[in-house]
Image (cartoon, helix red, strand yellow):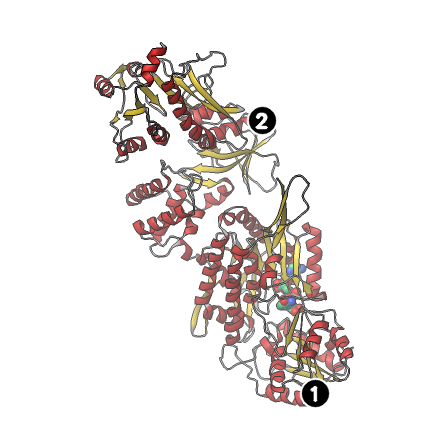
């Protein structure tokens, strides 16, 4: 016997590989590395259409004879012509790495050394065709595989070797196969062949104790889940069929119809039940299941919960949490023949990249694709189908069927791709500035324009002629809740899938669209808020675009630190921080720069990776609505940005109170800011940043450049008709130049062009709204009553319809007067004198206010200027300039002007939270 093996070992083993798929092809490749082995033939399945099995392709590359049989037997009898071909190769060992066919005993016994076969369970447990599924369905703690000597039974032959691994709680059929059964199985096949070659392969008779023979799960009736079971059994059943073929459940619709679905992505859910769910009835469940923000929640008979993350409806796999959304948004089912041909072409592209069989539920990334594969897919799809696809589309639709539907949408829309969608919305047509501009008039929630609850509306008035421009939907607390839910789902759903760099690209797309539509946006802003068109173009819109571009650049530069901490010796410690988005953010903005206030806040918020909803000021929400339309065209996923015009006391309050809003960015008045801060604390202690009112001092020393001081002094007050939070609320002019300064200001005021803000020569337009105009008139009356000298204006512009208020100048203003203390937020210059010999008193007076937003100084003496910058209590200091803000420079106040910054890197941090991670090693 020993001699026989010695003789055998001196010969090459002649192996016939019988099987199919990548597994068999990999075994073949490994065996080819052995010099004592010759692969004499490969026996596999016939081609499917034009596609040959990978085992056949691999064998042909190595010039190994390939035989493709549809079947080896007929009516239990081996086919003679097949047997003859098998015998022709003269195999001494049959290796069956992955074989789905019945192989006749004449073949099994036909090789001198016998036949060794791979089986994906630890035999004798789970004999049969669905061993991996049953390992999970039965809740086994260990999984594994066996290589056995084939005999005339099914998976009953003596064992050669077994290997095992623990079943992890996160395992599914797919993961066990990919992480263990496949890679270790391929290697073990070679070990088994080596053992046969060296004569050391055992033949251990299988015990019958503990033997099971399980039903085949490729039969549909076996795939139906029994929901009258414990949560653990439900979980195990779903993961045992995940991702192929998927456990079948039946939805019982309210209208009496039934729908068969398949369940994927199950996990035990100890946080159940849920409060935010919607009922879904499933056959076999006595209690309803719940669709909630994380999936489909099913209660087992033991009261524990299983959550299902994905559902296959028809051919499409969706996030379970999108169930109701998907039922509203009909998925494409009416494919044309041409589209179905394209589907085959597309599957070919996917197959070439992923090198695996493609079916409707194939997930591009779960199949191991990386970023280069995304590029390749996009480029190949562009080339074959001539569609303007972007990388993001792959991330948004990673499952084959979703991706195909997306492609069909592209093809049906012709050149109008989904990132340039024609949105359906109610609008009014603004005819102004030689343009006709369609402006949406509904709330923008979850990527769609919708009516407000109860069809409530706000009247939008044109401040230039006091006429109603249009009616706009007015959000209620219920509408706010809908938007928050959408933002919440987007935050945990599609927005998370988008990489920081892609996020930046979306923001750049948006900035480009705003740039292309800047004249439209500026026209709307001008008509809606009374902003002078040229200023609206440069500042309201121009700086908004810059904000989106600037913050887009930050998206992929948000990073933490590594921190040297004391290690717990003898071990080492690595401590690092991560900067993470906060979640759903509420933004509330005032009416003075409607689009710019939106952009300052939202660009930082979105760049940081948050989702948001904004409540713009009720008097002028139109640019925010036009902006919402652009976000869809830029390609932002639904729910990331929501725009809800409404009243502060109602919709605004609902944002501040909402439990799911984790951060509130507010710009507005100090009293409302205080109120909001209380609401943030009372509701859920949400983080808030407050950009509030100001009464900014501007000091003009006698040694200034007078021309410059007058020019900037004028704009410090009258810029944007004084509706400017950093407007100089009080000017301190040195006594030596006081009269001269006033004379020159008045001279310029007399020639200021007041009128239609759309007229290019106009520099001063109407105030934003009537209540504000009335407040300014009252403010002036208080000034006069308190004894200040009104030297110019203080009244409406005579003979002009609209909310026009004459630029105003008060002198002789003493510190105790109302107009010296309070913000007017209008074009009112308040001038007090000071003596250049008493700078200490001047600084004391300049700081004697509860506000601390901005400040300015004009002097040629750098020492005086820097000393002023040291001593002034304000978040912004301008020296020999005023109103010079920039998107890269942090902006925000001290004291009761609020806290937290807009703009610059600091603004990003307002919308991030820091996580500290410590690792011992
Ligand atoms: P506001 O009356 O405080 O209103 C600001 C925003 O808050 C508006 O959208 C308003 O809605 C909303 N709101 C009102 N009550 C609310 C509540 N209970 N809960 C939640 N939201 C509520 O200020 P404004 O009159 O519009 O704006 C002028 C003020 O803003 C001035 O004080 C100015 O200095 C300040 N501001 C500051 C900055 C800065 O960066 N520091 C910049 C610009 C303006 P409605 O539209 O319904 O009123």
Instruction: Identify the residue at image location x=49%, y=57%.
Output: 504
Query: Which image quadrant: the N terminus?
Result: top left
Above or below for 168 versus 871:
above
Q: Is residue 836 left or right of residue 184?
A: right
Q: Is residue 864 left or right of residue 552?
A: right
Q: Is residue 22 left or right of residue 184?
A: left
Q: Quadrant of residue 400?
A: top left
Q: Secondary structure at mark 1?
A: helix
Residue 310: x percent and y percent? 48, 38
Q: Secondary structure at mark 2?
A: loop
Q: Quadrant of residue 646?
A: bottom right
Q: Nearer the viewer, mark 2 or mark 1?
A: 1
Judge: label 1 CB < 8 Å from ligand 1. Answer: no
Q: Which mark is residue 293?
A: none
Q: Quadrant of residue 567?
A: top right
Other residues around mark 2 within 10 Å, as few (<14) / some (14–19) / many (≥20):
some
Other residues around mark 1 within 10 Å, as few (<14) / some (14–19) / many (≥20):
some
The residue tagged 2 is 301
Nearest to the observer: residue 896 or residue 17: 17
The residue tagged 1 is 738
Query: Which image quadrant: the C terminus?
Result: top right
Q: Quadrant of ligand 1?
A: bottom right
Q: Earlier in the sequence, mark 2 or mark 1?
A: 2
Above or below for 164 versus 833:
above
Residue 583: x percent and y percent? 59, 50
């Amino acid at each position: 016997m020993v001699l026989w093996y010695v003789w055998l070992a001196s010969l090459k083993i002649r192996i016939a590989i019988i099987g199919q798929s990548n597994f068999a092809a990999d075994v073949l490749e490994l065996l080819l590395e052995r010099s004592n082995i010759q692969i004499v033939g490969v026996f596999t399945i016939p081609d499917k259409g034009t596609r040959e099995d990978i085992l056949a392709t691999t064998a042909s590359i190595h010039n190994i004879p390939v035989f493709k049989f549809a079947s080896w037997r007929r009516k239990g009898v081996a086919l003679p012509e097949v047997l003859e071909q098998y015998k022709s190769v003269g195999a001494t060992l049959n290796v069956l790495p992955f074989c789905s066919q019945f192989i006749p005993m004449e073949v099994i016994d036909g090789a001198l050394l016998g036949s060794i076969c791979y089986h994906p369970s630890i035999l004798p447990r789970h004999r049969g065709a669905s061993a991996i599924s049953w390992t999970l369905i039965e809740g086994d703690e260990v999984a594994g595989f066996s290589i056995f000597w084939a005999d005339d039974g099914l998976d009953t032959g003596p064992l050669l070797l077994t290997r095992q691994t623990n079943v992890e709680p996160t395992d599914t059929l797919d993961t066990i196969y990919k992480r263990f059964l496949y890679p270790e199985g391929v290697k073990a096949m070679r070990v088994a062949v080596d053992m046969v070659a060296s004569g050391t392969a055992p033949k251990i008779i299988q015990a019958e104790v503990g033997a099971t023979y399980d039903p085949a799960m490729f039969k549909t009736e076996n795939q139906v889940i029994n929901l009258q079971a414990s949560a653990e059994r439900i979980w195990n059943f779903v993961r045992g069929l995940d991702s192929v073929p998927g456990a079948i459940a039946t939805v019982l619709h309210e209208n009496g119809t039934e729908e068969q679905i398949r369940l994927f992505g199950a996990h035990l859910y100890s946080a159940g039940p849920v409060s935010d769910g919607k009922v879904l009835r499933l056959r076999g469940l006595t209690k309803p299941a719940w669709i909630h923000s994380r999936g489909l929640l099913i209660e087992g008979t033991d009261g524990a919960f299983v959550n299902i993350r994905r559902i296959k409806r028809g051919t499409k796999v969706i996030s379970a949490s999108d169930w109701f959304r998907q039922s509203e948004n009909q998925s494409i089912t009416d494919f044309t023949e041409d589209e179905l041909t394209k589907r085959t072409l597309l599957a070919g592209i996917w197959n070439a990249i992923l090198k695996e069989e493609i079916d409707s539920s194939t997930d591009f990334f779960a199949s191991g694709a990386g970023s280069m594969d995304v590029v390749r897919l996009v480029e190949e799809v562009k080339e074959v189908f001539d569609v303007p696809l972007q990388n993001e589309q792959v991330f948004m639709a990673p499952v084959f069927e979703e991706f195909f539907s997306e492609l069909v949408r592209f093809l049906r829309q012709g050149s109008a791709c989904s990132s340039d969608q024609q949105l359906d919305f109610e609008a009014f047509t603004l005819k102004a500035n030689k343009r006709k501009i369609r402006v949406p008039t509904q709330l923008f929630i979850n990527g769609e324009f919708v009516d407000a609850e109860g069809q409530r509306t706000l009247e939008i008035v044109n401040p230039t002629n006091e006429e109603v421009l249009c009616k706009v939907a007015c959000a209620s607390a219920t509408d706010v809740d809908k938007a928050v839910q959408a933002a919440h789902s987007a935050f945990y759903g599609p927005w998370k899938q988008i990489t920081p760099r892609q996020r930046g690209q979306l923001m750049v797309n948006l900035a480009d669209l705003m740039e292309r539509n800047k004249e439209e946006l500026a026209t709307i802003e001008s008509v809606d808020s009374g902003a002078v068109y040229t200023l609206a173009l440069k500042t309201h819109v121009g700086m908004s675009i810059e904000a989106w571009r600037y913050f887009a650049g930050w998206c992929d530069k948000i990073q933490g630190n590594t921190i040297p901490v004391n290690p717990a010796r003898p071990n080492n410690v690595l401590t690092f921080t991560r900067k993470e988005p906060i979640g759903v953010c509420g933004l509330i903005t005032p009416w003075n720069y409607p689009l710019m206030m939106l952009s300052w806040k939202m660009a930082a918020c979105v760049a940081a990776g948050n989702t948001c909803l904004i409540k713009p000021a009720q008097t002028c929400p139109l640019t925010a609505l036009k902006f919402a339309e652009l976000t869809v065209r830029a390609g932002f996923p639904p729910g990331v940005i929501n725009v809800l015009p409404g009243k502060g006391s109602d919709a605004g309050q609902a944002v501040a109170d909402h439990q799911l809003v984790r951060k509130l960015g507010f710009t507005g008045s100090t009293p409302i800011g205080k109120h909001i801060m209380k609401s943030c604390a009372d509701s859920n202690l949400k983080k808030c940043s407050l950009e509030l009112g100001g009464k900014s001092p501007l000091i003009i020393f006698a040694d200034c450049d007078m021309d410059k001081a007058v020019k900037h002094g004028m704009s410090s007050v009258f810029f944007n008709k004084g509706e400017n939070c950093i407007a100089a609320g009080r000017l301190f002019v040195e006594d030596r130049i006081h009269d001269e300064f006033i004379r020159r200001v008045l001279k310029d005021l007399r020639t200021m062009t007041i009128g239609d803000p759309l007229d290019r020569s106009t520099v001063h337009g109407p105030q934003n709204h009537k209540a504000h105009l009335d407040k300014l008139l009252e403010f002036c009356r208080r000034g006069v009553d308190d004894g200040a000298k009104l030297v110019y204006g203080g009244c409406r512009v005579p003979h002009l319809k609209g909310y026009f208020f004459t630029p105003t100048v008060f002198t002789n203003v003493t510190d105790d007067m109302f107009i010296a203390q309070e913000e007017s937020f209008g074009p009112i210059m308040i001038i007090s004198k000071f003596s250049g010999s008493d700078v200490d008193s001047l600084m004391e007076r300049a700081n004697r206010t509860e506000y601390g937003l901005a400040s300015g100084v004009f002097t040629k003496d750098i020492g005086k200027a820097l000393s002023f910058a040291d001593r002034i209590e304000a978040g912004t200091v301008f020296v020999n300039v005023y109103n010079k803000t920039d998107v890269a420079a942090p902006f925000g106040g001290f004291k009761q002007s609020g806290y937290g910054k807009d703009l610059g890197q600091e603004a990003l941090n307002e919308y991030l939270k820091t996580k500290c991670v410590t690792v011992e090693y």
